[in-house]
Structures are given as C-alpha cells and as structure tokens.
Image (spheres, grey):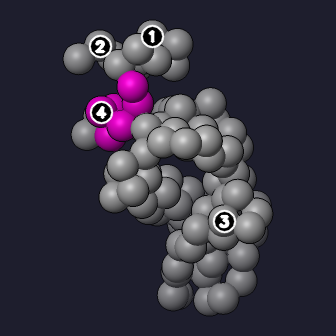
Amino acid sequence: MEQSVVDNAEKSRFEIREAGELAGFAEYHRSGSEIAFIHTEIDPRFEGRGLAGKLARTALDTAREQGLAILPYCPFIRGWIIKHPEYIDLVPASHHAKFGLLAD
C-alpha cells in the first residue's frame, strides 16, 4: 500500500497516511530552532506495519534538513532515537541525560 508522511504545520504534527487514509501522527511544538515531539499515535487498524518507524524517521530527517534541535518528550520518539543512534546528534548534548540518551 502507498504510504506518505507530511508535515501538517497547521495542526503541529507530522501525519502518515496509507492509501490516503490518516493512519497516525507525531505531534510537536516548534519554538525557534527547536522542535519538541510530545506524542505519537498510530490508529490500531494500522499497527504492525512499520508506520510509526517510518513516521519517526521522516519527522527526524525533516528536522535535520531544517537544522532543528530535537527534544524527544514523546516516549516513542525517544525510544526510536535510542534504537537509531545516528539520530542522537539531533538532541542537544545538554539534554542527553534528561532524555536518557547515551553521552557522546
């Protein structure tokens, strides 16, 4: 099935759609050069398809492209970063301990 992720800035969230239907989202709060991820949710009908991981990767890649620092308050985003250490550099080093991330 066709999947797409878009930044719905009006709703302050990245949305993932499958076959045009909203399957989930990652809510954020953006302030200056920081983006704080606060909640990620996948509709139960779409679970088990890897959509949350695709959503996280696209959101974090977009933040990197825009030069934004990540504040992973959302447990899913934080856990995803821990499992994909190539994204830890997006979290300011001064916040690593706060979010339980490995030191550089």
Give the label on residue 89, or none.
Answer: 4
Q: Secondary structure at mark 3?
A: helix
For disc 1, the neighbor class at 10 Å (few under 14, some 14 to 19, many from 20) is few
In the rendered image, residue 103, in percent from the top left (x then y), is placed at 29, 13
Q: Secondary structure at mark 1?
A: loop
Give the label on residue 103, or none.
Answer: 2
State which tag comes first along the sequence, 3 or 4: 3
In the rendered image, residue 44, in percent from the top left (x then y), is placed at 76, 61
State which tag comes first along the sequence, 1 or 3: 3
Calculate the distance from the C-alpha at mark 1 to the C-alpha at mark 2. Answer: 8 Å
**What residue is shown at x 52% (from left), y 13% (from top)?**
98
**Nearer to us: label 3 or label 4:** 3
Q: Amino acid at mark 4?
A: Asp
Inspect this view and state whether residue 94 appears: yes
| Quadrant of the frame with the C terminus | top left
Residue 14 located within the stretch drawn in magenta: no
